[in-house]
Image (cartoon, rainbow, N blue to C red):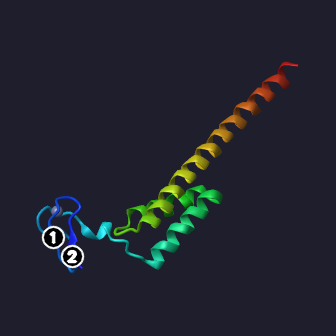
Amino acid sequence: MVNYCPCCGNKIEDNERFCAKCGFSVQTIQEEYSPANNGLSIVGFVLSFFISIAGLIISAIVLHKTPISKRDHAFGKAGLIISIISLVTIILSIIFWIIFYFLILNFAIMY
Ligand SMILES: [Zn+2]
């Protein structure tokens, strides 16, 4: 099997990890299936719904691993986005309830 560098079009041998001409990492474009990493990306994705901080950390770890399959990358990115959204939602609702609490408190004192 002969590959060509997607960056510069140089011919790349099967055993080569990097393009000899431009240094492009060929491994990142190969769909390498790593069961452990794949499981981790799904764990991060699922956790992001329930424990946003844990989901955020695991998704970040998955995204920083190279090589990464397209599926892992998609799960990692989704987990990251969902955990950030749920974290922001939690923080906003805490701020809302603090403001609400003080408003009620002020109202109770006034009357
Ligand atoms: Zn190249």
Q: Which residue is mark 1?
A: 11
Q: Amino acid at mark 1?
A: Lys
Q: In the displayed structure, does residue 71 sit left or right of residue 95?
A: left
Q: In percent of the image, x 50 and y 64: which residue is there? A: 58
Compared across the picture, whether 65 is left or right of 76 comes to left
Q: Residue at x 42, y 61 (%)?
A: 63
* Image quarter (top left, top right, bottom left or bottom right) of the C terminus: top right
Q: Is residue 75 above or below residue 98?
A: below
Secondary element type, mark 2 = loop
SS of the residue at dot 1? strand
Left or right of 47: which side holds 68? left
For the residue pair 77 and 110, the one nearer the viewer reads as 77
Asked whether the beta carbons under mark 1 and mark 2 sit within 8 Å of each other, the answer is yes
Q: Residue at x 65, y 59 (%)?
A: 50
Of residues 65 and 30, which is closer to you in this image? Answer: 30
Q: Which mark is residue 100?
A: none
Q: Report which residue position mark 2 lands on.
A: 2
Figure disc tally: 2
